[in-house]
Image (tube, rainbow, N blue to C red):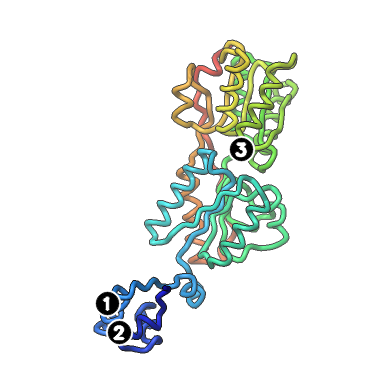
Amino acid sequence: MTVGIKDVAKAAGVSPATVSRALSGGPVSEELRALVAAAVTATGYRPNLAARRLRSQQSGTIGLVVADLRNPFFTAVSRAVEDSAYRAGMRVILCNTDEDPEREALYLRLMQDERITGLIFAPTRTTLDQLGKRRLEFPTVLIDRSSPAGLYDCVVLDNREATAELVRHLVERGYRRIGGLFGNASVTGLERRDGYAAALSAAGLTPDFRLCAPSADAARAELATWFASRDRPEALVVSNSLFLSSAVRAARAAGLSIPNDLALAGFDNETWTELVEPGLTVIEQPVEEIGRQAMALLFERLQTPNLPVRKLVLSGRCIVRGSTAAR
């Protein structure tokens, strides 16, 4: 049987209105507050937090909507956001969209229903395009994606420059047929493709890249076909850590040695990238700083809603290992 506020009032010998005031921190005596607390314990009553938020119009909740929790980048950023929220006495609702606009729309409606205080958001390409036409109903900071028309605060990596740095490194090591594999569903993947293509063109070389769905299976299938063809690259740049692990597996399945048959470089300095022989060259993203800075921007926006829109562009760090040894 569900215990309601009337049951608590009956057990305490007071009115339901008095119970409501006591539970919400309203003006009642400490003696009465203790009496109501004892009645809550005795009856096993659990407050309806959703109804309380509806009345107060505040939730003390941060929404966090990310593109793919399988990607260690978003796992690390989520941890940094949660740490900052915890220190501020707030809770976090975490949702994973898998770059699916319909799923994303569902979670944004959930955030409205929960009356969140603010949102940290890595939108899909579809939703990012729509953000320029319709504003979200809560203070929002974008991560890993730039805001359309400067409407939202955002924290991003300089994706084009980071990928260009990997390409320049490979060119300096003597590679000429440098392929690229990039996600087809996110702005981030396309920005890294653009940086790759621009750096190759600047070096007088021809870009040769593939776009694929943001999953390890899709990447392995795409690479298996590519590695078996006559136009197999001698070096490969990939746009995220999922693709990087897929490239290692696909190379092994094709009997290719890294870096003798295929030089390999990508993103995210995960522990395994150092352990896989001969060690993988990667761009290390400042993931914890991205999460902390996003929360700092959100807190500032909550305190001063009319602040100018801010965009923080952070730099990655190229960690060179054996996978890109000189030819």
Question: On screen, 26 above or below 321?
Answer: below
Mark 3 to mark 2 CA distance (whole Å): 61 Å
Q: Which mark is residue 26?
A: none
Q: Amino acid at mark 3?
A: Asn
Q: Which mark is residue 12?
A: 2
Residue 311 visible in the current orientation: no
Count of marks placed on residues: 3
16 or 174: nearer the viewer: 16
Instruction: Check disc 1 and report the residue beneath it.
Output: 38
Residue at point 54%, 67% (across, down): 115
Q: Is residue 326 left or right of residue 105?
A: left
Mark closer to the chain start, 1 or 3: 1
Residue 212 visible in the current orientation: yes
Q: Dividing the image into 4 quarters, which one contains the N terminus?
A: bottom left
236 or 253: nearer the viewer: 253
251 or 16: nearer the viewer: 16
Mark closer to the chain start, 3 or 2: 2
Secondary structure under tag 1 reads helix
Residue at point 52%, 64% (across, down): 116
Instruction: Check disc 3 and report the residue beneath it.
Output: 159
Q: Is residue 271 left or right of residue 192?
A: left
Question: Residue 32's spot in the image, x, y percent?
Answer: 28, 84
Question: Residue 178's spot in the image, x, y percent?
Answer: 67, 20
Q: Amino acid at mark 1?
A: Ala
Q: Dividing the image into 4 quarters, which one contains the C terminus?
A: top right
